[in-house]
Structures are given as C-alpha cells and as structure tokens.
Amino acid sequence: MKSLRPPIDVHSTEFRTEVPDIFADIPWVRYGETRRTNPEDDALSGSVAQADLPLDATFDLQEPPGDRAVFKSVERIRSANRIAALLGKLGLHELARPRPEYATGLITDEQFDDICSTREDRAFADAVHTRVNGRGIMFSPADCPLVVVADPTKYHESLTVIHAGYKSLGEDIVGLTLGQLPLTTTNAHVFITPHALNNYPVYGAPLKNLENSPVTRDHLGPTDDKGNRNLNFSSAIIARLGDFGIRHSHIAVSPDDSLTDPTLYSQRNWQQKGVNGRNAVMAGIVRH
C-alpha cells in the first residue's frame, strides 16, 4: 500500500477562494474552501479532518505503512496548516470554529471567544453570526450544506453561517437562527455550499424525525425497497428562507455534489470514495 504521509506543507491547488456570484455586489464578503485535488498521490489532500472518526476510518481502509498514532498526528498538523493558509488567503484575523451540535445552537460576537480556539472543549454550535471586521467562520462538512447569509444593509452589515445537517435542519436551525437575529432579510443574499444534493439517504429514527418535521417532511423522496428516503437539503432550506422573506433571486446553490464529486469528502459515501475526510468552508468579513 502507498503511504498516506506526504510532506506536511500544503499546495495552492487545494484552495478555492472565489467569492460566489451571489455576493458579487457585497465587497466585504470573503469565502473559501479546501478541495481534494490530488487524491492519487495524497488521499487526504484538502482535508481538515482532525477528529478520530475520519482519521481512524481512513487508516483502517487504506492500511498505510507505519504507526496509526504517527499517521493521525501528521494529518492533524497538515489540517491545521490548511486552515491557517486559508485564513491568510482570505485576509482574516480571527476564526470561529464551533463544534457542530446537530441541533439549534447559535453563537454571536459576544460569545466569540468560546469558539475561536483550537481546544477540544470549545463550544458547540450550528450557527455563528458576526459583524466584526476581520472575523471568519469555519465549518468542515462532509455532505452537510452550510447556509451563508450576508446582510448588506447599511450600518447593519453582518455575516451568518448555519450548519444545516439533516438533524439540525429538521429541528429548524435555519428558522430559529433567522428568527433570533436582527437581519434585514429582504436585503440578505444567501449561498448554500456544496453538499449531498438530491440523493442523501435517511433511515431509521432520524428518518422518522424528518417525516415529523414541518421543515423537512415535504422534501423527502419516495420510500425505497429498504425503507430509506432521500432528503433534498437545498429545497428544504430554500423554502425556509422564503418563509422569512429572503428573495428567491438572492439565493444561490452550489451545483457541486459531495456524494459524487471527487474533490469533496462524503460521510455517506466515504467507503466508496476510499477515504474519509472533511472539506473546510470558511467565510468572513474584510472591510477596507
């Protein structure tokens, strides 16, 4: 087996820093992603995975030579280097990195110190809101969509990032976040990041929860022969945004599908892809 321990430095091809077109008229928005751009030589290129679950899964699947602990240590260093490099490329100075709660937690600037460290005990949250220049927000999904909301209203500029995994989406993380924040939703522009687009299978107890949720129940496909149903993340998110007055023309959805795109990691399809990692998605505010 080929070693999965390439040099610790990272390559510029692993980053995308183009601001989505939906934010073209909002000059202070910064946006970036990491991508898996060199999978043949570097199975975890672009990954910012630092937790045991994806790193152990990749080690067990790939069976690289060498010690598991060393492999994980090297990948964590490479992950940290990618995060720091992306932060620098976007011109940001502080970074919120909450641990996803898969529920309805929201953190604003008043609690920013609780999520801007790299400590394992940093706060849980599925939504972060900031108005501070130089601040960024990062989540590291592997199928889940993020909802990036920019409010360009004069004297009220703000950026919000919502981690809308299927559990938190079903519990109305989008509606609860928009309902708590002083957003001018008729002015807001929204980008829904790369995610599992149309064929994300849900089953068991989580499926029952989604079938009972008014946010998601109308966005599930037919039941297959295994009792599973596919969730359409983006249609559920768009409908909820519309409930709060966000214009359809102000919403854009990435066409990139984590289930099939080789540059994106997938928690559902990690075994088929032969690797389990996480892509970084970072957005922030830079005013000159």
Image: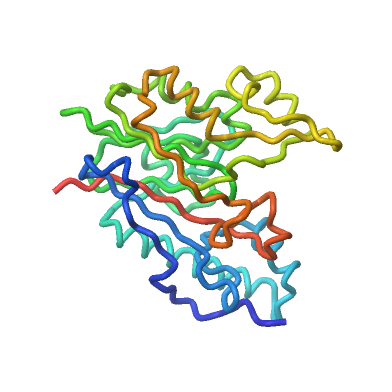
Q: In which quadrant is the N terminus drawn?
A: bottom right
Q: Position of residue 102 (x, y in %)?
A: 59, 35
Residue that lies at the very extreme toward the right in this rendered image: 225
Q: Residue at x 35, y 30 (%)?
A: 249
Q: Is 150 placed left or right of 47 in the picture?
A: left
Coloring scheme used: rainbow
Q: Position of residue 120 (x, y in %)?
A: 54, 51
In the image, residue 221 above or below residue 261: above
Question: Count of labels shown?
Answer: 0
Q: Quadrant of residue 276?
A: bottom right
- Front in this rendered view, residue 242 or 147: 242
Q: Residue at x 58, y 71 (%)?
A: 39
Q: Is 281 placed left or right of 151 in the picture?
A: right
Q: Residue at x 50, y 80 (%)?
A: 7
Q: Position of residue 232 (x, y in %)?
A: 60, 34
Q: Residue at x 52, y 65 (%)?
A: 36
Q: Position of residue 3 (x, y in %)?
A: 65, 81
